[in-house]
Amino acid sequence: DAGVIQSPRHEVTEMGQEVTLRCKPISGHDYLFWYRQTMMRGLELLIYFNNNVPIDDSGMPEDRFSAKMPNASFSTLKIQPSEPRDSAVYFCASSPGQGGYFGPGTRLTVT
Amino acid sequence: GIQVEQSPPDLILQEGANSTLRCNFSDSVNNLQWFHQNPWGQLINLFYIPSGTKQNGRLSATTVATERYSLLYISSSQTTDSGVYFCAVERNFGNEKLTFGTGTRLTIIP
């Protein structure tokens, strides 16, 4: 398996623009997680899905953030409109039920 | 929620030295993982170790679940070991999410 795949790897956008991050989990994994890493807050969970259903989105910072998982092999994290404080590395991870396997991350810079 | 503390926060060692990284957690857990985030930002699974001891080459880890801590040992350090080491724990109370510690930044000097 190729592991968790994320795209793009780097994204630079201007404040106010919509940003869409994409993730393909490891095949067969029932859980998918979106994490954000910043210097100030470290690694924090934003949302996770079980069998494509959002289970806990309490970590989503505000309504500008939304996540979807239309099928078992694809998920998106969308920020609309983006703000400079959203600049961070966003990780997607998948799990068969215990443990986590992380993607390479998307480094987002909002200017 | 559960608290995860790692120590030391920073560690600078000469190549060839050994090191011990510690992870304390505040409640019972069903899972504990160690990750290495390399200087390029990639998070790499090192160990899945809810209890007991595991070894993989120069790295080994021990989790004493009853005392709520885990140790990561790195022997004969190499410059490629540099990066941040995260401990993450998981409690199986109807959800399956990892809570991360703040990490230990390890710098290996040639």
Image: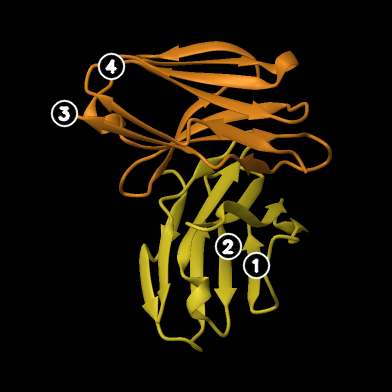
Proximity of marks 1 and 2: CB atoms separated by less than 8 Å: yes
Please give the name of the residue rendered at 44% of the width and 43% of the height, measured from the top-left corner: A3
Mark pair 2, 3: CA separation: 42 Å
- Rendered position, B53 above or below B9: above
Instruction: Say which mark, if any, is on residue A75.
Output: 2
Mark pair 1, 2: CA separation: 6 Å
Instruction: Name which of mark 1 and mark 2 comes first in the sequence.
Output: 1
Chain letter, disc 3 residue: B
Q: Which residue is mark 1?
A: A68
Mark pair 3, 1: CA separation: 46 Å
Mark 4 residue type: Ala
Chain letter, disc 2 residue: A
Residue A93 drawn at (x, y percent): 55, 48
Mark 3 residue type: Pro
Mark 2 or mark 4: which is in front? 4
Q: Which residue is mark 3?
A: B110
Instruction: Say which mark, if any, is on residue B17.
Output: 4
For label 4, the crowd category at 10 Å Cα-Cα, with few meaning under 14, some 14 to 19 and many 20 or more, is some
